[in-house]
Image: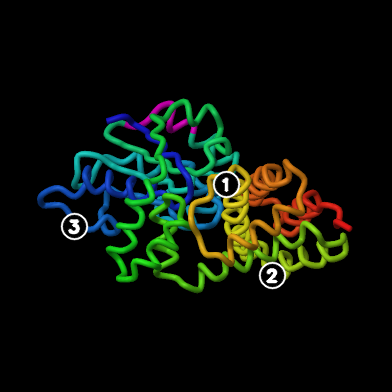
Amino acid sequence: MAHAYCLTGEEGIGKTALARALAEELLLGEGQPRRLEVHPDFWSDDRPEAISIDEIRFHPERGAQAHDQSLQQFLSLKPFVALLRVALLANAERLTEAAQNCLLKTLEEPPPNTVLVLTTSYPDHLLPTCLSRCQIIGMSPLGRPAVVAFIASRQGSAEEAEALAGLAHGRPGWAVRALTDREWAVRMDRWAEELAALAFEDVDGVLGYAARFGQGPQAEMRLVASDALRGFTAFLRDAMLLQAGLLSSMSGTRKAALETWVRGLPADHVRASLAAAQRTQLLIDENVNPRLAMEVMLLDLRVRRLA
């Protein structure tokens, strides 16, 4: 075993599921607790919030607020019942720069009998020095037949399985969430529709819309903005596939909306929009004010109204 792994791939592709499966293989042997959540040699962080340095460093100044022990404290101890201690940092792009620099010390001089697994959809948001000290495993999207079969095995409608597979783009995790949380799927579509329409809005309209990301505690607004960016990014991905002639079958309503939107844009606007959305997510992960981050992105992505 390597001392550290970084699983990369698109959101919803199964990185965290694979990381947990690896932890189970390493920890849940004969005579061990049967669930990772209660295993004394397993530590994980899979929250939507940013990961501060206090969750990582050995002596947190304010305590590790989300854990009984910081990551470095946990890894410094000998295994309690298993042969190894395993830690999982899911969506590691949530690490602040200070937290990443602190983590680097652990990656450079890992304690014995420990395995650290990072997952991320945005490896370019992590310090190159951190990535270079991990064994990187890239995960690819599943083929459409496999996704259709995966969805169909969880619900009986072949028609719905085909429709969801077209939206999932090889991401089984995305399909599972859409199946189990219908409200989330509707919310993603609503965010995509609203943010895409702002490309043709005037400045006052954009600023008025962006103000909603400042109507509450910043921690809460960060989650709302991240939700909006997730829906918008999915829409932009479909738009790029449409422009390239690679869009697989999907509902006629969504395809028509994509075609109408793309027709009103300059040639490189979709690509620039996707890059800006990902950059904005990084800024929000680094605790930039979500209203200001969304405001800048939406203003930059405006195009002139067509006559």
Which of the pair 138/69 is nearer the observer? Answer: 138
Q: Which residues are magenta?
A: 104-111
The residue indicated by pointer 1 is 241
Q: Along the polypeptide, which appears first: circle 3 or circle 1?
A: 3
The residue indicated by pointer 2 is 216
The amino acid type of the residue labelled 3 equals: Arg
Q: Is residue 42 magenta?
A: no
Which of the pair 260/85 is nearer the observer? Answer: 260
Q: Secondary structure at mark 3?
A: loop
Q: Secondary structure at mark 2?
A: loop
Residue 31 position, x and y percent, is 11, 52
Q: Is residue 111 above or below residue 282?
A: above
Q: Along the polypeptide, which appears first: circle 2 or circle 1?
A: 2
In the visual, does 122 lie left or right of 148? right
The residue indicated by pointer 3 is 34
> Which of the 4 quarters of the picture holds residue 73?
top left
Judge depth for marks 2 and 1 and give the one in front. Answer: 1
The residue sitting at 56% across, 52% down in the picture is 50
In the visual, does 198 lie left or right of 36? right
> Which of the 4 quarters of the picture holds residue 106?
top left
